[in-house]
Image: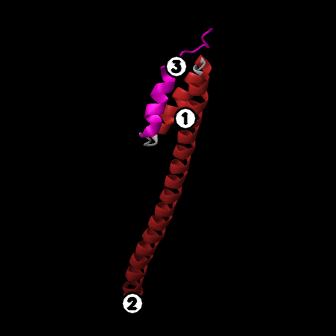
C-alpha cells in the first residue's frame, strides 16, 4: 500500500511544483508588462513637460532659477527612464537661458 502511495505521490508533487512555477512565472511576466507600461507612461509625461517648459521659457527669453531646478529633476528622471532624444536638446537650450528677464 505504501509503495502504491509513493508511486502516485512523487509524480503528483512534481506536477504540482511545475504548475506552481508556471503560475508564478506568468504572474511575474504580467507584472513586468504593467511596470513597463507605467515607466513608458511616466517617461512620456516627463518628456511632454520638458517640451512645454521649453516653449514657455524660450518665448519669455528667460527661465527662473526655481524652474531650472525643477526641470533638472524632471530631466534626470526622464533620462533614467531611458529618455534621450529631442527633449535632451531642448533641456540644454533651456538651461542656458538667463534666470532673470533682461531690461530693455
Residue span colored magenta: 85-104
User: How far apart, in angstroms, are the residues tagged by discs 1 and 3?
Assistant: 14 Å
Q: Is residue 1 magenta?
A: no
Q: Residues within 10 Å of mark 3 (few under 14, many from 20)?
A: some
User: How far apart, in angstroms, are the residues tagged by discs 3 and 2?
Assistant: 82 Å
**Between tags 3 and 2, which lies in front?**
3
Front residue of 58/69: it is: 58
User: Is the C-beta separation of discs 1 and 3 under 8 Å?
Assistant: no
> Dividing the image into 4 quarters, which one contains the C terminus?
top right
Q: Position of residue 67 (x, y in %)?
A: 60, 23
Q: Position of residue 34 (x, y in %)?
A: 53, 57
Helix, strand or loop under label 3: loop
- Mark 2 or mark 3, which is nearer the start of the sequence? 2
> Dividing the image into 4 quarters, which one contains the N terminus?
bottom left
Q: Residues within 10 Å of mark 2 (few under 14, many from 20)?
A: few
User: How far apart, in angstroms, are the residues tagged by discs 2 and 1?
Assistant: 69 Å
**Between tags 2 and 1, which lies in front?**
1
Front residue of 86/38: it is: 86
Q: Position of residue 102 (x, y in %)?
A: 60, 11
Residue beneath the point at 37% across and 86% down: 7
Task: Please give the residue where the numbered disc 1 appears in the rendered image.
Answer: 50
Query: Horizontal placement of 67 versus 83: left or right?
Result: right
Task: Please give the residue where the numbered disc 3 appears in the rendered image.
Answer: 97
Q: Quadrant of residue 103?
A: top right
Front residue of 98/36: it is: 98
Q: Position of residue 31 (x, y in %)?
A: 51, 59
- In the rendered structure, find residue 64 and report the number of the disc placed on it: none
Residue beneath the point at 39% across and 76% down: 14
- Mark 1 or mark 2, which is nearer the start of the sequence? 2
- Mark 3 or mark 1, which is nearer the start of the sequence? 1
Number of numbered discs visible in the structure rendering: 3
Amino acid at each position: 500500500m505504501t509503495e502504491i502511495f509513493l508511486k502516485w505521490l512523487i509524480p503528483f508533487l512534481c506536477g504540482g511544483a511545475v504548475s506552481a512555477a508556471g503560475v508564478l512565472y506568468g504572474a511575474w511576466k504580467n507584472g513586468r508588462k504593467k511596470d513597463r507600461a507605467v515607466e513608458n507612461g511616466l517617461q512620456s509625461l516627463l518628456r511632454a513637460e520638458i517640451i512645454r517648459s521649453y516653449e514657455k521659457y524660450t518665448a519669455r527669453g528667460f527661465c527662473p532659477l526655481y524652474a531650472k531646478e525643477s526641470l533638472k529633476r524632471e530631466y534626470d528622471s526622464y533620462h533614467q527612464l531611458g529618455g534621450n532624444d529631442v527633449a535632451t536638446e531642448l533641456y540644454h537650450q533651456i538651461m542656458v537661458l538667463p534666470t532673470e528677464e533682461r531690461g530693455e
